[in-house]
Amino acid sequence: MSMVMQVRLPDDEAEFVRQRAQNGKTKSDVLREAVACLRAQETNALMLEGYREMAAFDLELAEADIGAGADSLPEW
């Protein structure tokens, strides 16, 4: 399903879309690509946040394992 949408763009942005719409692309194609890029950026930002949270959790686990291992190692 698709929806008809009219948007207003500043002249420089509208010109950019027109230029990108050359070579067999429509302005709609260009805007769909732009939306796909924004979705990808949002996904990447969410993934980065998740990886950072996991890194902090992994560090906590590693420190706990090191501490547990030090308690169980025989003294030299």
Image (cartoon, grey):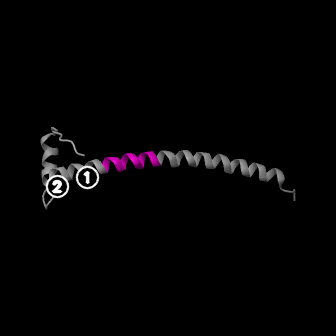
Residue 50 highlighted magenta (yes or no): no
State left or right for residue 19 relative to residue 65: left
Residue 76: percent from the left, percent from the top? 87, 59
Report, in whole angstroms, how far the alpha carbon at label 1 lies from the one at label 2: 10 Å
Question: Which residue occupies the foreground of this view, 3 or 74?
Answer: 3
Q: Which contiguous range is marked in magenta?
A: 37-47
Q: Earlier in the sequence, mark 1 or mark 2?
A: 2
Residue 37: percent from the left, percent from the top? 31, 51
Disc tally is 2
The three-letter amino acid code for the residue at tag 2 is Arg
Residue drawn 36% across the image and 50% down it: 40
Q: Nearer the viewer, mark 1 or mark 2?
A: 1
Query: Which secondary structure, mark 2?
Result: helix
Q: Main secondary structure of the magenta part?
A: helix
Residue drawn 42% across the image and 46% down it: 45
Residue drawn 78% across the image and 53% down it: 69
Dot 2 surroundings within 10 Å: few (below 14), some, or many (20 or more)?
A: some
State left or right for residue 57 relative to residue 39: right
| Relative to 7, residue 65 above or below | below
Residue 14: percent from the left, percent from the top? 14, 45
Cβ atoms under marks 1 and 2 closer than 8 Å: yes
Residue drawn 57% across the image and 49% down it: 55
Question: Which residue occupies the foreground of this view, 11 or 37?
Answer: 37
The three-letter amino acid code for the residue at tag 1 is Glu
Q: Residue furthest bottom?
A: 23
Q: Which residue is mark 1?
A: 33
Query: Which secondary structure, mark 1?
Result: helix
Q: Which residue is mark 2?
A: 20
Residue 29: percent from the left, percent from the top? 20, 53
